[in-house]
Amino acid sequence: MDNLLLLHGALGSAALFDELKQLLQPHFRVYTLNFSGHGGQVLPQEPFSMSMFAADILHLLEREQLAAVHIFGFSMGGYAALYFAWRYPERVQRIFTLATKFAWSPETAEKEIKLLNPEKMAEKVPHFAATLARRHAPHNWQQVMHKTAEMMRHLGKQPLLTSDVLLTLHQPIQVAVGDRDNMVSLQETISAYQHLPEGRLLVLPDTRHPLEATAAQRLAYEIKQFLQP
């Protein structure tokens, strides 16, 4: 069996993949991880960064003695997967991203950061705030959010996955986006796909941004189709 690593998005955790992992386990050796500061992992003193998350991925591969893996990355997890493939191309076989934002600028970063206000979130969507509190316990979910906003601001000023970087990624890579995603545009996803030497594009109909908006069975099917051609 091939190795498959599932990478969660911003403010997420490995637990969000529980159902998807069960569906994929008959076909792959499936691994998950919580990025630094997420899902109860210790909050680092330094800012969140793709370098930090790439180090998390490398640590898992070394710990599990995995020479190479396929990677499915949701949202920020997809960005981390591609960045990791750029840094360590020999450790990555194929990549499937879903709802990954590629078009980072100061303007797009500020738009996303406006949604990451812990005080307003606790007031207006207390149910989600409580979910985040449980997800990242025993650490402070508000600090996770602040660090995520800080990382987005840095990406806005200095995007990492430029067109030049994407052109160097020679693994088969499928970028997927929902046609109703209000955070990631079809245009930016197509642009990324066009710069990938072995790129493929998948548009999921009637699908919004959250991972939960894509049925786990449908997603498992698409992952299997791409990773086991």
Image: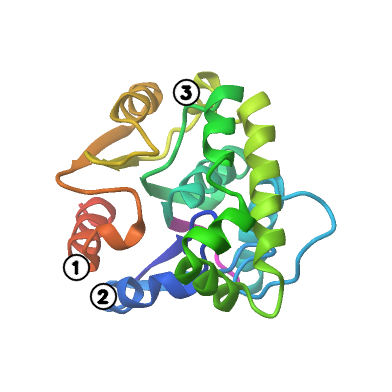
State the residue lying farthest toward the top.
164
- By what rule are the colours in the image chosen? rainbow
Q: SS at mark 1?
A: helix
Q: Position of residue 23 (x, y in %)?
A: 26, 75
Identify the residue under disc 3.
167
Which amino acid lies under the numbered mark 1 shown in the image of this protein?
Answer: Gln
Residue type at tag 2: Leu
Provide the residue designation for mark 2. 23
**Label 3, residues with CA under 10 Å away: few <14, some 14-19, many ≥20:** some
- Residue 82's disc is none
How would you rate the neighbour count of disc 1 (Cα within 10 Å): few for under 14, some for 14-19, many for 20 or more? few
Compare marks 3 and 2 and give the one earlier in the sequence: 2
- How far is disc 3 from disc 2 in space, using C-alphas? 32 Å
Q: In which quarter of the image is residue 165?
A: top right
- Residue at image coords 35%, 74%: 21
Q: For residue 217, which numbered disc appears in the image?
A: 1
Q: Are marks 2 and 1 in contact (CB under 8 Å)?
A: yes
Q: Is the magenta stretch mostly helix, strand or loop?
A: loop
Q: Please, is residue 25 above or below residue 219 in the view?
A: below
Residue 185 located left or right of residue 38: left
State which region is magenta: 65-70
Rounded to the nearest whole Å, what is the CA distance between mark 3 and mark 1?
Answer: 32 Å
Most extreme residue toward the front is: 123
Q: Nearer the viewer, mark 3 or mark 1?
A: 1
Q: Can residue 184 be seen in this view?
A: yes
Q: Is residue 61 toward the left or the right of residue 30 in the image?
A: right
